Image (cartoon, rainbow, N blue to C red):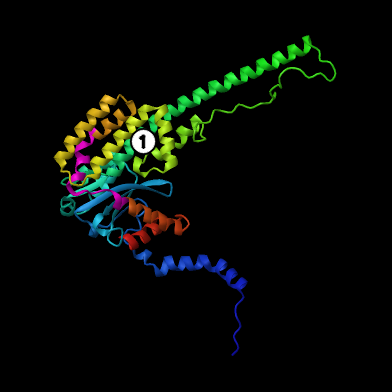
């Protein structure tokens, strides 16, 4: 029997027509979703107690325009056996109520939980895993200080914008004065035919141009573009970034001091040979330097760090971070992007449990 190749256009039309049917059949018959015992409440919570371990992470992530709290097992390394719990929302009382459905002996066996600065996450961990040590992620500690440094940069940027506005106003006033002077001169000194006199006048429609600095930036542009360099330590700067940094530090010595203090804090956490008590002493010295700097943005960030000092210093016990939770969030978002978004949340979470649970 002769066979004929199916035209590409016909195949394309077939899959456009039957793609939804294929997807529906996979969901209803092949995936096993209808036999999933957690399908009824998956929109609100999912628990996988078999994945419990001694070292956990907790974080929040956005799905379908709502925040979800995720609890994961570090020993799963972002693969099968990583996901423990998914709870809609971040309200401590609601999440605690769900997590307490996990077996008590497994909850009491948890030794450490890593998290960010969130107070609600802190309350959740204290209630659900009472014997666990809480470790605040170092990345969020440094980020909080960098945010304070960025607020300081914005203070000087606003000042530069104000100065530029005054310069523009003076320029416009001078332009109006020149215009009036020209009109008065024309009235009092009628020009004879072919006569050239006086200096060449400036254009009436001349636009204001702010002064450029040595690297080609205006002062406002300088403080705008400095955002990308102040979050890094000096040894990571390129030559052009070093030039920009020196200009910034010249206009704002406070930024130089604040950047130096943030780098000192970063060095404390980079030194993995430090014990918890040694790190505590080094932090005390750093607190004093920040207080003496009189930089209000950095002092506010210091207070946040000092309030959570014990949880932050737990980093020097096992050097644990919240990178596992961030990695899991990234993988789930990558999976979501492959699906072109989430239309059916329970089925999406079911598939996530098949991959990460």
Front residue of 207/36: it is 207
**Residue at 23% across, 49% down:** 320
- Magenta-drawn stretch, dominant element (helix, strand or loop): helix
Q: Position of residue 280 (x, y in %)?
A: 17, 37
Q: Does residue 109 appear left or right of residue 296 in this picture?
A: left
Residue 51 part of the magenta segment: no
Front residue of 140/27: it is 140
Q: Is residue 313 visible?
A: yes
Q: Which residue is mark 1?
A: 147
**Residue at 35% across, 27% down:** 254
**Residue at 46% across, 27% down:** 158
Q: Position of residue 50 (x, y in %)?
A: 23, 60
Q: Is residue 41 visible?
A: no
Q: Position of residue 355 (x, y in %)?
A: 34, 62
Mark 1, residues whose alpha carbon is within 10 Å: few (<14), some, or many (≥20)? some
Viewport quadrant of the N terminus: bottom right
Q: Position of residue 225 (x, y in %)?
A: 46, 37
Q: Quadrant of residue 352?
A: bottom left
**Residue at 34% across, 28% down:** 297
Q: Does residue 185 appear left or right of residue 55 in this picture?
A: right
The span shown in magenta is 306-325
Residue 318 part of the magenta segment: yes
């Amino acid at each position: 029997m002769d066979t004929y190749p199916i035209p590409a256009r016909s195949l394309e039309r077939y899959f456009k027509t039957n793609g939804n049917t294929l997807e529906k059949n996979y969901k209803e018959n092949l995936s096993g979703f209808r036999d999933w015992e957690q399908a009824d409440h998956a929109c609100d919570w999912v628990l996988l107690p078999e994945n419990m371990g001694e070292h956990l992470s907790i974080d929040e992530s956005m799905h379908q325009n709502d925040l979800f709290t995720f609890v994961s097992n570090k020993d799963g390394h972002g693969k099968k056996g990583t996901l423990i719990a998914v709870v809609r929302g971040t309200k401590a009382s609601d999440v605690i109520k769900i997590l307490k459905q996990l077996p008590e002996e497994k909850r009491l066996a948890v030794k450490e939980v890593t998290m960010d600065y969130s107070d609600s996450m802190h309350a959740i961990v204290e209630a659900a895993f009472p014997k666990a040590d809480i470790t605040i992620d170092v990345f969020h500690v440094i980020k909080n200080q960098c945010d304070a440094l960025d607020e300081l940069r914005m203070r000087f940027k606003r000042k530069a914008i104000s100065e530029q506005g005054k310069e523009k106003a003076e320029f416009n006033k001078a332009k109006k004065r020149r215009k009036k002077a020209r009109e008065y001169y024309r009235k009092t000194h009628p020009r004879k035919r072919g006569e050239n006199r006086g200096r060449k006048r400036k254009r009436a429609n001349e636009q204001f141009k702010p002064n450029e600095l040595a690297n080609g930036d205006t002062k406002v542009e300088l403080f705008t573009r400095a955002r990308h360099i102040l979050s890094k330590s000096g040894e990571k700067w390129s030559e052009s970034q070093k030039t920009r940094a020196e200009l910034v530090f010249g206009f704002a010595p406070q930024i130089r001091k604040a950047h130096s203090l943030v780098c000192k804090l970063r060095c404390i956490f980079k030194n993995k040979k430090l014990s918890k008590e040694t790190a505590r002493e080094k932090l005390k010295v750093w607190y004093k330097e920040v207080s003496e700097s009189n930089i209000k943005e950095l002092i506010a960030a210091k207070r946040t760090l000092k309030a959570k000092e014990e949880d932050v210093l737990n980093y020097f016990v096992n050097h644990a971070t919240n990178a596992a939770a961030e990695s899991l969030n990234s993988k789930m978002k990558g999976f979501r992007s492959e699906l072109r978004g989430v239309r059916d949340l329970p089925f999406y979470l079911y598939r996530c449990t098949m991959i990460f649970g």
